[in-house]
Image (spheres, grey):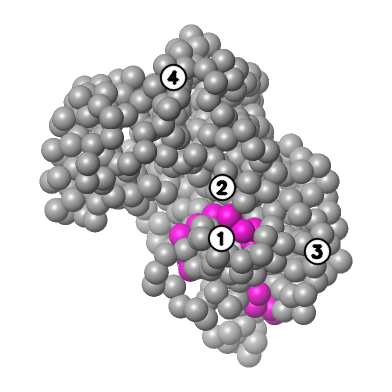
Amino acid sequence: MSIGNKTHENPHETLFRERTQNSREFNKHAASITPLGVESNVRSFAPYPFYVERANGSYVYDIDGNEYLDLLLALGPIILGHGHPEIRAAVKEQVDTADVTATPQPISIVFMEKVAEMTPSIETVRLANSGTEATMHAIRVARSYTGKNIIAKPEGGYAGAHDYALQSVFASEEALGPANHPNTVSYGTGIPDAVSDTVVAFPFNDEEATEEILREQADDLAAVLLEPVMFSCGCLMPQQGYHEFLRELTDELGVVLIWDEVMTGFRLGPGSAQGRFGVIPDMTTFAKVAGGGYQMAGFGGRREIMDEIIPPESDEERTWDSSVFHGGTYNGHPVSAAAGLKALEILESGNVYTHIERLGDRLFTGLQEVADDVGVAANVQHIGSMGQIYMTDHDIRYYRDTWHSNETQFADWWLEAAGRGVVFGTPSQGERFFTTDSHTDEEIDHALEVAEEALRAVDHPYED
């Protein structure tokens, strides 16, 4: 994640700076109100972020009046295009019906029924407000169900912004230690060492090392939490057989397998990644696409696991430590539920996936071809409508392979493209970008033209 402003000007920022004078001045004002002048660290980058005033279809428009072809798509939630008319209508109807009441509303139950109907692993489900909340609660339920404390997650994997998930997301090679037996390292300050002691990292795609680590921890291992495709470091695809191996191993060890489908949920098909890969986890977390552009998240799984949330019926058995607590004033917010329900109905009944995946193939295959033509070392990885371009010709099989990417060159390429009106995700090599249903062939072709211009501009990357 790239945060903060450089102290001197990078020549690849020139076009961006020329177009965004109002954003530059607004960033100075915003920084006096909130750290870095943004609502989330991920939204800050050098030299400064542009501030969006409105969005519609395939485009966002900044406070300088610039139009950008949007491939960031709110980091994933926008799968039908900004301001989809059916979702807007559903939201307006719900706004006129009821806002939040902290009493159950039918719209939220109907939404959960749709989630369970579409997601192979989910028998019962609860709602939350963000992917961070979803993984936090899923971990707690898994610990209660197993009576164990340790959580295993892949090195390089992001699973939310709570303390148990911010482990071994990113660190130096020295801190992370051996590739086949990585250390657990907190990402950022303010996280107690005691939390790190309850999380163990393993190398995604390395079956031998994964098995060794999980067996070592088996006596106190509650759950394995991972993204089915590691989009937390760009786009790291699972190797053939890895998920089947992990499913069998966790079954044998009595460990809850949690798939973090916050990014892939309802993006890789109506059955999410688990429907696409044919591997069924014990629990699943979801967010982003599920909300139709509004705040929505949740977690669910096998009924016997989710029943950990239910207090015992008798007064004698119902104590302060007899069940898992799950709560939240805004859980199942009716407006978000209405938006999410409409989005899932559209995704389930239409040809959205055919369209966005065809365009995804066109975009990401085209990016590789363009990079090869220009002569820039690049390795484009994608699945369906989402992917990333790594600025390296190194194979991308394990998390540490992504370290070969030239992050400076990638950030410069992003700035050159943004200066020409196309937003390829964020300037961070560890993010990714997407196609959406409102995109057209002509827009993808334009994106590829801009990508080529930007690649030619960074063929000899600037060194600060």
Q: Quadrant of residue 65?
A: top left
Q: Residue at image x 50%, y 12%?
A: 445
Classed neighbour count for the residue bearing mark 1: other residues with Cα under 10 Å, few (<14), some (14–19), many (≥20)? few
The Cα–Cα distance between marks 1 and 3, rounded to whole angstroms, is 22 Å
- Residues rendered magenta in the picture: 141-163
Looking at the image, tell me whether mark 3 or mark 4 is earlier in sequence order: 3
Residue 198 spot, x, y in % from top left = 60, 76
- Tell me, yes or no, whether the two marked residues, 1 and 2, touch with CB atoms within 8 Å: yes
Q: Residue at image x 46%, y 60%?
A: 161
Relative to the observer, which residue lies in front, 208 or 324?
208
Judged from the image, the secondary structure of the residue bearing numbered disc 4 is helix
Q: Is residue 287 visible?
A: yes
Q: For the residue marked with disc 1, what is the amino acid?
A: Glu
Residue bearing mark 1: 173
The Cα–Cα distance between marks 3 and 2, rounded to whole angstroms, is 24 Å
Of circles 1 and 3, which is in front?
Answer: 1
Looking at the image, tell me whether mark 3 or mark 2 is earlier in sequence order: 3
Classed neighbour count for the residue bearing mark 2: other residues with Cα under 10 Å, few (<14), some (14–19), many (≥20)? some
Residue bearing mark 2: 403
Q: For the residue marked with disc 4, what is the amino acid?
A: Arg
Residue bearing mark 3: 211
